[in-house]
Image (cartoon, rainbow, N blue to C red):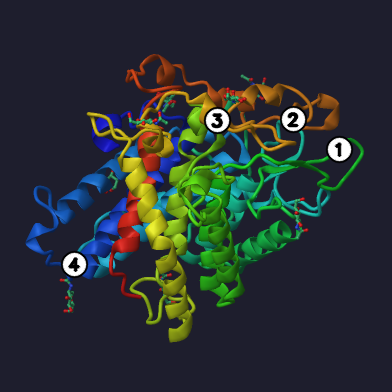
Amino acid sequence: MQGTSFWSGYDWPESIDWIAAVLGTLLGASDRSFTEILIEYDGSLPGSYFSGPTIDGEISRYYSQVESFFKSENVGDIFGQAYDDAQWVVLEWLEVIKFINEYNSYINGSDLGEENLSRYAHRAHVFYNIVQNEFETSLCDGGITWNPTLETYKNAITNELYLSSSIAMYLYFPGDYNTDPYPTANYSSDTNTTLPPLTFLQPHDPVLLDNAIKEYDWFKTHNFTNEQGLIVDGFHISKGQTTCDKRNEMVYTYNQGVILSGLRGLWEATGDPSYLSDGYDLVNTVIDATGWNAQDASEASQWSGLGRNGIMEDYCDASANCSQDAQIFKGIYFHHLGIFCEPLPTITPLVANLTVLAEDDLAASHSGHCDGFRPWVIHNANAALSTRDQNNVIGGWWGSAHNNGTEGATLDMSVPRPEGSWDERNDPSVLDQAPWACRDADGCRQGRNGNALSARYVKPSAIRSKKRDVNDGGRGRTVETQGSGVGVVKAASDFTRKRPA
Ligand SMILES: *[C@@H]1O[C@H](CO)[C@@H](O)[C@H](O)[C@H]1NC(C)=O
Ligand SMILES: *[C@@H]1O[C@H](CO)[C@@H](O)[C@H](O)[C@H]1NC(C)=O
Ligand SMILES: *[C@@H]1O[C@H](CO)[C@@H](O)[C@H](O)[C@H]1NC(C)=O
Ligand SMILES: *[C@@H]1O[C@H](CO)[C@@H](O)[C@H](O)[C@H]1NC(C)=O
Ligand SMILES: *[C@@H]1O[C@H](CO)[C@@H](O)[C@H](O)[C@H]1NC(C)=O
Ligand SMILES: *[C@@H]1O[C@H](CO)[C@@H](O)[C@H](O)[C@H]1NC(C)=O
Ligand SMILES: *[C@@H]1O[C@H](CO)[C@@H](O)[C@H](O)[C@H]1NC(C)=O
Ligand SMILES: *[C@@H]1O[C@H](CO)[C@@H](O)[C@H](O)[C@H]1NC(C)=O
């Protein structure tokens, strides 16, 4: 991902803004995984572990890329986009802060990145501030709408992100007393907007925990799951109604994932094990929906709701018509599953001070559940790795191994979308029509800098400069497919590591 697609000073030039924030998250998370490998081996790795680069060398290399990306991240534009976009940036910088704290607590005398911490915290604060007051109860009793420039759509991703970003802010945000509300120095003059100053935000502010609890209570009581138990994409509100009465039955992989890091964080902050149980149930539902527990090979090869042959797929994978957005979805799933399955702390961890400590039997039961997921995670990582081309770039359709490795459109394996679904993440043209498009009279708001939602889908350079492999259908192998690969392979590495609590 880094060797092929990262150009220092430009940084993943082919990705779109929110996905770049996810790639930055994966980079910070990879540095955290490497740190945990150092801890596991107590600094002295078995000689055979790595030939070539040392783990410490990899950690500094990726950290310097994270720092470079801080400077080039397109924060001016992303600031004006939808309420999901902003929150990927929050999670990104909190992940980096977690890495810095963990690394420096372990390596005696290291202060890697310490002098940058306050800037990272400020960016997380500026972007959290965008959504902080957007949970509103006049429609659907709560939740956050996807994009204020469209008709109200209370969707899974925006609300799962609000759970995850609120609880991560509560647990890891180090505080910020810089009241500058703008994402860039020139933002105010460039956009002719004046924003109120940010308010001070302390570490572990109880409001952040309240936001997370309130969000999950709302999410859980507004049936986001289909008959199979998979999370659907979201709710519209019919004309003249105030309740979430019109559900979009579309199922995407990332909607099954982001909630998991939120549930893990809620346990960590409250000690209530029901959050973990909800997570196990959802992961098991997803695993079943890939055909992993099928009776036999023939049953396994049938579409099961979110994949087949035990391999996760989005609807667009087999037909090779995933958008740039959808190409990163599976990587997001595995990143958040990885966070969910981190061992529960039984001794005071190196960094946090407010984490609840797990009783031994709860910690063991958590590891037991997650050990149960391990073979499935490894199976998916191997499937992703099997799609590598001669340049080691991973393809989008991990299930293609069962179709002789082709990444081309395979229409006889393409399955119809769920009844009653709009696939707006792959076909943004639906957003110009009811029930999405905003009629001025309906009081939809202008974006913070007037950006229409569709602006985020257009990144011509990403399409023009693509070098396509003859076997590649659709957008082909891209930084997003590679990012999804990093997500699942990193998860498999984390799941196979001996992970002391
Ligand atoms: C850091 O110092 C502590 C206490 O002296 C020691 O136990 C530990 O092994 C050291 N860690 C590393 C990574 O050198
Ligand atoms: C991080 O801190 C160093 C040293 O002060 C500085 O040179 C560098 O520009 C900072 N990077 C960021 C992203 O703030
Ligand atoms: C900010 O504005 C100043 C003065 O107009 C200009 O020189 C500078 O290039 C601008 N910086 C950016 C990042 O646009
Ligand atoms: C900026 O906004 C002010 C107040 O709304 C308006 O009077 C002014 O014309 C705007 N300037 C530009 C360059 O749009
Ligand atoms: C949620 O909706 C699905 C699909 O309509 C239905 O099968 C399920 O029973 C509902 N769950 C709850 C808790 O109401
Ligand atoms: C832990 O608590 C101490 C004392 O209250 C505080 O100074 C420190 O910043 C806290 N650390 C974290 C990571 O929150
Ligand atoms: C894959 O190749 C094998 C051997 O050539 C063939 O038997 C099988 O039908 C192929 N499968 C698909 C899905 O094309
Ligand atoms: C992708 O292709 C499949 C199969 O042709 C089709 O059913 C589906 O509507 C297409 N999706 C999009 C977003 O174009």
Nearest to viewer (mark 3 / mark 2): 3
| Of callouts 3 and 2, the N-terminal one | 3
Query: In 3D space, how far apart are the residues under numbered discs 3 and 4 (Cα atoms)?
Result: 55 Å
How far apart marks 1 and 4 lie (CA) works out to 59 Å
Distance between the Cα atoms at labels 3 and 2? Answer: 26 Å
- Based on the displayed image, in which of its 4 quarters is residue 267 positioned? bottom right
Question: How packed is label 3: few (under 14 Cα within 10 Å), some, or many (20 or more)?
Answer: some
State yes or no: Cβ of the residue under disc 3 lies below 8 Å from any atom of ligand 8: yes
Q: What residue does disc 4 label?
A: 109
Amino acid, disc 3: Ser
The mark nearer the N terminus, 3 or 4, is 4
Mark 3 element type? loop
What is the distance, in whole Å, between disc 2 and disc 1 at their CAs? 11 Å
What amino acid type should be assigned to the residue bearing mark 1? Ser
Residue at 48 percent of width and 52 percent of height: 296
Mark nearer the N terminus (1 vs 3):
1
- Which residue is more in the foreground, 463 or 99? 463
Position in image of residue 269 (x %, y %): 54, 72
Q: As displayed, is residue 377 above or below residue 473?
A: below
Identify the residue at horizontal 9%, vertical 51% (top origin). 51
Q: Nearer the viewer, mark 1 or mark 3?
A: 3
Disc 4 vs disc 2: which is toward the camera?
Answer: 2
Q: Identify residue for label 1.
A: 238
- 134 sits left or right of 169 in the view: right
Separation of marks 1 and 3 at Cα, in angstroms: 31 Å
Q: Are marks 2 and 1 in contact (CB under 8 Å)?
A: no
At a point 49% along the width and 43% down the height, the residue shown is 301
The residue that label 2 is drawn on is: 436
Of pointers 4 and 2, the one earlier in the residue sequence: 4
